[in-house]
Each structure stands twice: as structure tokens, then as C-alpha cells.
Amino acid sequence: TDLLHRRHTTLGARSPLFYDTPLEVVSGSGVWVTDVDGQVYLDGYNNVPHVGHANPVVAAAVSEQMSRLNLHTRYLNDRVVDYAEALLATFDAPLDRVFLTNSGSESNDLALRIARQHTGRTGVLVSGWSYHGNTGRLAELTTGLATGEGLAPWVRTLHIPDATGVDDASGLLEESLSAVDTAIASLVEAGHGVAAVVFDPLFSTEGLVSPPSGYVEGLTARVHAAGGLVLADEVQSGFGRTGGRMWGHRMFDVRPDLVVLGKPMGNGHPLSALVTTARLQDGFGARNDYFNTFAGSPVSAAAGMAVLQVMAEEDLLDRAAQLGHYVAGRLHEIVAGDPRVAAVRGRGLYFGLEFVDPGDPTVPDAAATRWVVEDMRRRGVLISRIGPAGNVLKMRPPLVVTRGEIDVLLGRLASSLAALSDA
Ligand code: PMP
């Protein structure tokens, strides 16, 4: 089409687009989006429109503040401080300070600067299949997307163990924690030392991996013992996505020093944050002038505050917990006895199915997964896929999804799986 051609000749033919035939969306409401031909889709993919596409409360708050004043943060403004207080009230001590930024990339990059300066070390531990952002430094530790940089010498990657369906979880735990010890020893020996471990509590890019119980605790304890800091990247797992709790790291008994938030935070308005301790923030401030033109503006604060307000009014944490249990139960029913599906994955309102070769469940089936994603689009539902082999369906609707809408998604998924047999 003309628009696709114009896009290719301006944004570049390599700028990523979903689907064999790209989808042109023009409007949205709640979990629904409408394309240029008037076709309506249930959005089972996007977590950025957390409280719903075109949420009127967010739109009104942003528009009202934009009409009043929007300015950088070197002047006092009560809306910005009100928002910082409201956000920090959702964290446990000693996490009581925040840097506001515009993107998850900026927040993770800043977190690594803080970790390196604070520890005087440079090494970073990261999952062997993950994504934390697109700055130069983060590109050097990216394992889950292509980057021209390659891994930096100060990075060690960890294979995040998956306990799904594993009988000997304690053996797996022991083995994978010993791999953490090896990675730490290697960073120390190379003279980098350990500045930080960075992890997504949902291990979502990894394919929604569920490590054995005690793994995240053991990993973070080892990093702390080596003098490093713990960075929980909650860009995917934050704001109630895991169901029943605001922050994904609370699924574990861990104490992160740095917590990065993003995506759903401003319901689409660019807003991200790095939450940390007074000690780390003040220590960094003593040596660095950190300024960020657009970050933490009154309009961003208005967007962020409106998201928190809608989340509370609509009781979204509890709703995500209840719907998450419902989804998990229904998914197990739908795939019961289906040899093509090795596992139901995920937590809360981030869920997936792992596709394998029915003849050999150790062989991932990316083609079947891809087929289901395209077929679901034909059935009017937007989803995607993740994992190193691209064989895990990725379903992550806006958090305001209702039970009725979940039933639509799951009903169409069941039909798609039935059609897959014939495909
Ligand atoms: N961390 C995680 C876990 C992410 O999923 C992403 C984006 N996909 C980022 C960081 C980067 O965030 P942003 O695109 O806002 O820079």
C-alpha cells in the first residue's frame, strides 16, 4: 500500500511492524482497537494502554495540564511532587526516592550508572535472553534482540532455569545457582567485579520462564554478597501485571536496590522511573548533575497520577489477580491432552502457551506459534509470541480487561487451536 511504501522510504524498511500484512489502527477504547477499514480487534497484546486505550480520565488530565502549563523540572510544581509521593507510597522502605525519566531505556541506563559509581565496579549479570533498552550501554548487554555491538566484556549471561514441569526442582536450583557463582567469579577474575544484576521478575522476553523457588532469592543474595546491586526491571512486570501486587519483585523474597518502571506508567504518554534509596540517590547526586528535559514534567505527572487513580478506582490489582487465576485455569482446560502445547506459562494478566513438536516435546514449534498469532488476527484478536525459539504465545491485554473480554479472547484461541490441527 501507499502508506507502507511511504513508511519504508521514511522510517526505513527495517523499522519493525507486526504481521505478514501490517495492521493500520486508527482508534481505540478499553481493550478494543479499530483499524482503517472499521474492523474491530480485541487487544490481547498491549500493556502500555494499561487502563485502556484512549482512557478518558487520562486524556482529560493530560489535556487539562497541557492547557495550563508544561515545563521541565527546574521549577517547583505541586503536581510533580504529588505524583512522586503517590508513586513512592506503593514501595516498601528503603525504596523512597525516584528519578523520573521518559523511557525504560533511560531508567535502566541511569540505574547502571548509579550501580557502577556506587560499587566502583563495572560487571553486570543479565539473563541470556532478555531486553532492557536501547541506549549504547544497554545494547552491549542485550541478548534477546539483535544488536550490532555484541556483548561487552563486562557482561556475564545467566541461563534462567525453568522449573515448569520439572521433577527435580531442587537439583535444578542447585545447578543454576552454581552457574551464578561461576559467572560472579569470572567477572571478579577479569577485574570487572559485580556492579549489578538486572532482571525482569516475569522473565518475559525469556518466554515467561518460572525459575525454581529460591532462584531469584539465591541470585540476588549472591550479587549482594559480591558487593553488587540488584536492579529489578519492572517495565513488564510492574503496575499490577502479575496480579494482586503492584510490583513483580514481590513475588520473591528479595530487596532490590534499584527498580525500573515504564511502559504502562503513563498509559502511552512517555513516562518512566527509577525508584531507589535515599543513599543511592544522594550519593549519585553528590557527583553528577543529572538533568532530563522532558522527564517528570507536569503533563507526565498528570498522566501518571491519572493511571494510579484509575487503577485504585477500578480495583485493578485484585481484578488482575482474580482474572489471572481464571485465565490460568481456562488455559489448562483448553490445552488439556493437546500434545502440541508443552506448558501454560505466565502470571496474572501476562500469559502464554508453549508450542512444541507433538512427536518430540523437546523441539520448539515456532511455525505453529506464528500461525496462531496470524490466525488470531484474522479472528479479531491481537497477540504475539516470545522466547528464544519464538514458540511461546504472548498474551498481555490492557489491565482493564473484563472477564467477558477474556472469554472472547480464550474462546477465539480455542477455535484457533482447533483450526491449527487442520492447518
Ligand atoms: N525493560 C524491559 C523489560 C522492556 O520490556 C523494555 C521495552 N520492551 C525496556 C526495558 C525498554 O523500555 P523503553 O522501550 O521504554 O526504553
Image (cartoon, rainbow, N blue to C red):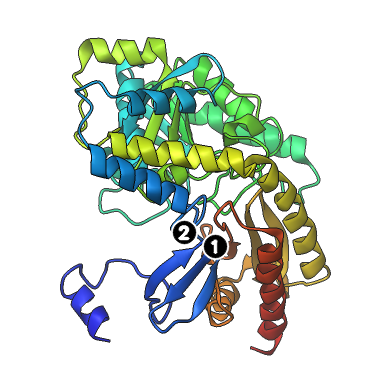
Nearest the viewer among 268 and 214 is 268
The residue at 20%/31% (across/down) is 72
| Quadrant into which the C terminus falls | bottom right
Which of the 4 image quadrants contains residue 412? Answer: bottom right
Give the structural element (helix, strand or loop) at label 2: loop
> Residue 216, percent across and down?
61, 31
Name the quadrant of the N terminus.
bottom left
**Which residue is labeled 1 in the image?**
31
> Which kind of residue does numbered mark 1 sit on?
Val
Residue 121: image quadrant is: top left
Q: In the image shown, does 170 or 5 lie closer to the viewer? A: 5
- Tell me the residue at 52%/67% (across/down): 32
Q: Nearer the viewer, residue 325 or 163?
A: 325
> SS at mark 1?
loop
Q: Are marks 1 and 2 in contact (CB under 8 Å)?
A: yes
Residue to which mark 2 is pinned: 53
On the question of residue 153 being in view, the answer is no
Q: Is residue 393 left or right of residue 8?
A: right
Circle 2: residue type = His
Locate residue 75 relative to residue 62 in the image: left or right.
left
Q: Earlier in the sequence, mark 1 or mark 2?
A: 1
Q: Residues within 10 Å of mark 2 (few under 14, many from 20)?
A: many
Q: How many marks?
A: 2
Q: Is residue 3 left or right of residue 246?
A: left
